[in-house]
Image: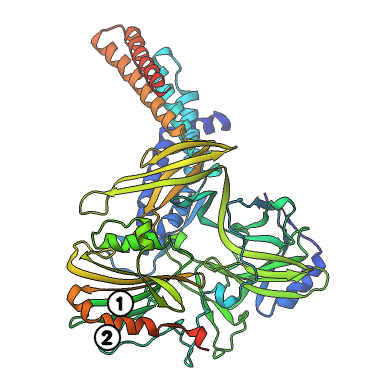
Amino acid sequence: MTVLQRLFNFLSSYALATALLVLLFVYTLLGTLEQVEHGLYLSQLKYFESVVITQIDLGACLRALNFPTGDMKLPVLLPGGYTVMALFCLNIIVGGVIRIRKKPRTIGVVISHFSMAFMILAGGVSMHTKIEGNLSLLEGQTDDQFVSVDSRVVEIEQVEPAAAGGKRKVLVISDSQFSDLAPDGSSGKARQFTSAELPFDLTLQNYAPNAQIKRDDGADGRRDVVDGYFIQALPKDPEHGQNMPALHAIAKNKKTGETQQGILWLRAAAPWTVKMEEKTYTIDLTRRSWVLPFAVKLEKATREFHPGTQRPRKFESIVTKLQDGKEERKEIKMNEPLRTNGFTLFQHQMMSGEDLKRTENASVFQVVSNPADQWPLWSCIAVAFGLLLHFSMMLARNVGWNEWLVAGIVVGVVSAYFILALVKMY
Amino acid sequence: MNQLSLRCPAAALLLTVGLTSCDRFDQRVVEITETREVSKHASAPNVGVSSATRFYDDAQRDESGAPMNPFIWTTPTGWTEGQSNQMRVINLTFGPNNEGECYLTAMPGASGGVEANINRWRGQLGLSPLPAADVEKLPRKTFLGGEAYSVTADGDYKNVGQEAPMKDYRLVGLIQQVSGLTLFVKMTGPKALVETNQANFESFVNSINFRARQQ
């Protein structure tokens, strides 16, 4: 048996499938327990979006199970959730689509396996291409910009002189380029950024993942004080979106070497202003945002709760979609999102005017752009169809009916159902 | 994808050496390649804002460094001063069990407008909204140098977050738009208690001023 044959056999084996499913079960268990202390976002990153897992926080898992324990971190080297799912997809394709005996009788099984692989592929496409954020509107307000909950960026905008034609543009530094600049022990870390559009180079340093800005009273003789303020690091909040990061920024004139220092903070009321070479720039640590190809105006937001509870019964927003001079009235309800232009707007939250101390209600939409948005639905339908076909033919064989007649009936009934559904939809 | 490129290694090395006292300087110089167009609906950036304002620290401070209330006032005799907060810049209570409340709220901008806020108050007392023409007919009182809308209304009062309304309450309030703010002075309590404290309310309102105007 050649090496390639052995590899083929291994990749298509039940043993591999079983091992991968066991690993997925274990990761689901560990991720669920760890997220109590580490939060959903970080646990998801560690167990389900990682290539390798290098550590398991046993202490956090035990504490989640009400076993009081100290710090217990177990170093491991395990394939991460991403790797496991990629291998599982390969296993299904090699074993369930390529290696399987392809006879007319196994067509249902082949369809089901192919659909399962397609579902895993959908997860991969979603992970790599999906963008997701929130669009918040008060009644009467119009906007076309949605902002990320988790992803932060440093944005630099030239505000004076203003951009020609009034089209504002910002330079963006992604958090993946500065979130590793957290001080390590007593020493800080720094990185320099440059652009031909800027008269200065920007150095970012000493990133604090969660911080508050404090006024310096001069008593501690701190060296990291900028304009009378310093960054006081706070413990990280398990809910990633709740953390308020901060960092130091230094703008250094490319010609003269003159420097200006500022503190960037996610919660700051306004950006840091830099004036250099007779131009004015704002530099801001903010949430990543995207612009929709259409604008949304919130006309009315209605919310109802089940009597005596805070459990929502009805969250409903009436909006107007504004695009290219055209206006379209739409409704967005719980479980009935608006799908348009490749974006899906889900009803996410709603605040009453009383909550906000305003006269208008507010609605928050979760905006998702995901090319694989509907792929899991299609693959679920295909898996169900494949299994229905397979089990119907098996049943027919066992009771002595004509299995191909039964298969034809199944295909006919399913096709009729979808034709009727399509007719109703359009 | 952003490109990582090493520019002027010698300069980077020098800079690194210069900063090694406490900072570890990444020798790479990262080219900023990502750009984003700003929505036309986005507000204009605030330029030249001081650090104190950016970090919510622009309240005036007393000798101990504690932030000072932006308003000054005289608390009527027999009334109790409570802790101020974001929604109640001045927070006073009165009555045998402190069941009477009187507070000042300052909101930026129009805050929904006078008519909507008066009708919000009326809604809290279970009363129907007043049409705009009737709102304009409401009496005015001098407050902070301007003319404030004056509201007196009776009903069963249900404040934000309360489940059951409180019977036979009176609300006395003023709404005034001044200096880019909308100011609300609101006194509530059992009707008889509020009636007996009407003069205290007047003296309290007349005593309120911006701290900055006094300096």
Picture quadrant of residue A253: bottom right
Q: Is residue A62 visible?
A: no
Q: Is residue B150 left or right of residue A327?
A: left
Between A188 and B91, the one nearer to me in the picture: B91
How are the residues colored? rainbow
The residue that appears at 61% across and 51% down in the rendered structure is B40
Between A221 and B117, the one lying in front of the other is: B117
Which residue is the extreme one toward the bottom?
B63
- Mark 1 highlights which residue? B102
Residue, disc 2: B79
Indicate which disc, 1 or 2, sits on the residue closer to the N terminus: 2
Q: Chain of mark 2?
A: B
Secondary structure of residue under mark 2? loop
Between the C-alphas of marks 1 and 2, the distance is 9 Å
Which residue lies at the image location 46% right of the left edge and 52% below the top edge? A137
Horizontal placement of A253 versus A336: left or right?
right
Quadrant in which the C terminus of chain A is drawn = top left
| Position of residue A188 measured from the top left corner of the image (x, y, whole percent) | 62, 74
Say which of A159 and A267 sits in front: A159
Residue B145 x, y percent position in the rendering? 46, 79
Counting from the top left corner in percent of width and height, residue B103 is at 34, 76
Q: Give the percent coordinates (x, y) of residue A157.
A: 68, 60
User: In the depicted view, which residue is nearer to us: B82 or A366?
Assistant: B82
